[in-house]
């Protein structure tokens, strides 16, 4: 399965959750448009190819830029490590390590946002092709969306 090449938008349903998703692709030129959409989103889903370990450093740089952007300071972040149906895919622990998220995770339970200075942020592994794993992540994320 090839990565998205251009910005796309579609409406998704995951269980009872209805979402408008913007897929910005991983292309450098498309990344420049990300800030234009910050005011239009309630959460960020950051999808990483768990098999493309050579690009983990690039993914970490982009993620660090998003996490440090003031416009997204309280925004929930759902990290999805995709392609876990492939045997050599990185595990959830490996993804957390390579993305530098070992100490900043909020956990899979619900955070009380009024009492927290940190944003909700969690890594889930999934296989979009096999339709597994991402539903749990979207359910976790939905508890923070108004």
Image: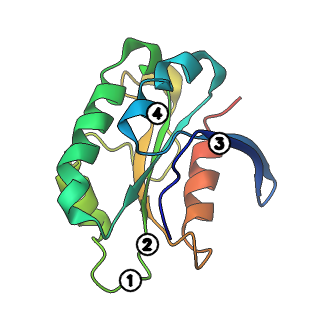
Q: Up-down: is 68 above or below 62?
A: above
Q: Position of residue 90 (x, y in %)?
A: 27, 70
**The residue tagged with tag 3: helix, strand or loop?**
strand
Disc 1 and disc 4 in contact, CB within 8 angstroms: no
- Mark toward the viewer: 1 or 3: 3
Q: Which residue is mark 3?
A: 8
- Label 3: few (<14), some (14–19) or many (≥20) C-alpha neighbours in 10 Å: few
Q: In the rendered image, which residue does mark 4 sit on?
A: 30
Disc 2 residue crowd, few under 14, some 14–19, many 20+, Cα 10 Å:
many
Asked whether, in this view, residue 23 is left or right of residue 80, the answer is right
Where is residue 97 drawn, in percent x and y?
A: 18, 55
Distance between mark 4 and mark 3 Cα atoms: 11 Å
Work out how far the residue at label 1 is from the one at label 4, CA to CA, in angstroms: 27 Å
The vertical placement of 59 against 134, above or below, is above
Q: Which residue is mark 1?
A: 86
Q: Marks 4/2: CA distance?
A: 22 Å
Using the rendered view, name the quadrant where residue 21 is placed. top right
Location of residue 48 with respect to 85 vertically, above or below? above
Measure how far apart labels 3 and 2 are at the Cα level.
20 Å
Mark 2 = which residue?
83
Q: Is residue 92 above or below residue 109?
A: below
Disc nearer the start of the sequence (1/3): 3
Q: Secondary structure at mark 2?
A: loop
Kindly check if marks 2 and 1 are in contact, taking CB atoms under 8 A apart as contact: yes
């Amino acid at each position: 399965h090839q990565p998205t090449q251009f910005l796309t938008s579609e409406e998704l349903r995951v269980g009872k959750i209805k979402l408008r998703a913007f897929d910005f692709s991983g292309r450098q030129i498309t990344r420049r448009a990300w800030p234009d959409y910050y005011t239009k989103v309630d959460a960020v889903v950051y999808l990483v190819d768990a098999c493309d370990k050579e690009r983990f450093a690039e993914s970490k740089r982009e993620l660090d830029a998003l996490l440090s952007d003031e416009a997204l300071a309280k925004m929930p972040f759902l990290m999805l490590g995709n392609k876990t149906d492939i045997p050599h895919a990185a595990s959830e622990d490996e993804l957390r390590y390579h993305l530098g998220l070992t100490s900043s995770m909020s956990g899979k339970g619900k955070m009380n946002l009024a009492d927290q200075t940190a944003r909700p942020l969690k890594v889930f592994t999934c296989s979009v092709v096999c339709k597994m794993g991402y539903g749990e992540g979207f359910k976790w994320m939905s508890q923070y969306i108004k």
